[in-house]
Amino acid sequence: DVRVGPEALFGPAEMGLELAQHFVHENRIRQAASSLGAAQYCINEAVRYSNERVTWGKKLSVNQGIQFPLVELHTEAAMLRQLIRYTASMLDQKHHMEVTHLVAMCNYRANRLACDAADRAMQTCGGVGYSRHMPFEHIYRHHRRYRITEGSEEIQMRKVASNLFGFTSSKGRQ
């Protein structure tokens, strides 16, 4: 047993877990926004590179094999941006446990998107995209860890599933 005097408490007694969960939810939505920003950067840079790079007398960007994967990433980023904004707003308006499933959706999808976008940027830019002359390999490694730390993506998916299948008391299904 450890005794802690009242002057050492942060917040009300018996509310430590509640306080910690609130911090974790706020951190996860910030992490999601950061991952979204990294993903958008990778998408934008891949588009820029493919518009500048000329192969066989044509811009690389005229190839549907270059266009379509970037279109899919761009579309997912746009949808995720709105979900992150909505979820951040709900965190300001509601108790954080009422929106834990939304935070989890944002967190696991944004972290995965950052990795997917970095991977696609490396592929689009070829050898130079994989080299340290461009930041994509660093972005991939940096954001890949977020799929493991602070609650793995499987844990985040479990939170979403608990809400979706009615295993939690939160009835905020979207």
Image: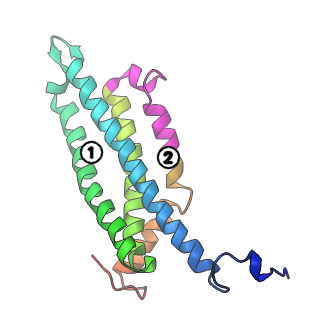
The residue carrying pointer 1 sits among few (fewer than 14), some (14 to 19) or many (20 or more) residues within 10 Å by Cα, namely many
Amino acid at circle 1: Leu
Drawn side of residue 22 relative to residue 45, left or right: right
- As drawn, the residue found furthest toward the top would be 57
> Can residue 116 be seen by looking at this rendering?
no
Residue 70, horizontal then vertical, whole percent: 24, 39
Seen from the viewer's position, the closer of residues 71 and 170 is: 170
Q: Disc 2 marks which amino acid?
A: Arg
Q: Is residue 172 visible?
A: yes
Q: Label 2's element?
A: helix
- Tell me the residue that label 1 is attached to: 73
Q: Position of residue 171 (x, y in %)?
A: 34, 86
Quarter of the figure that contains the N terminus = bottom right
Q: Which residues are magenta?
A: 125-142
148 displayed left or right of 118: right
Q: Earlier in the sequence, mark 1 or mark 2?
A: 1
Q: Main secondary structure of the magenta part?
A: helix
Quarter of the image where one finds residue 105: bottom left
Magenta-colored stretch includes residue 52: no
The spot of residue 136 in percent (x, y) is: 43, 32
What is the total number of numbered labels drawn onto the structure image?
A: 2
Front residue of this view, candidates 174 and 66: 174
**In the displayed structure, does residue 48 sit left or right of residue 146?**
left
- Residue shown at the point (39%, 72%) measured from the top left: 91
Q: Which residue is mark 2?
A: 144
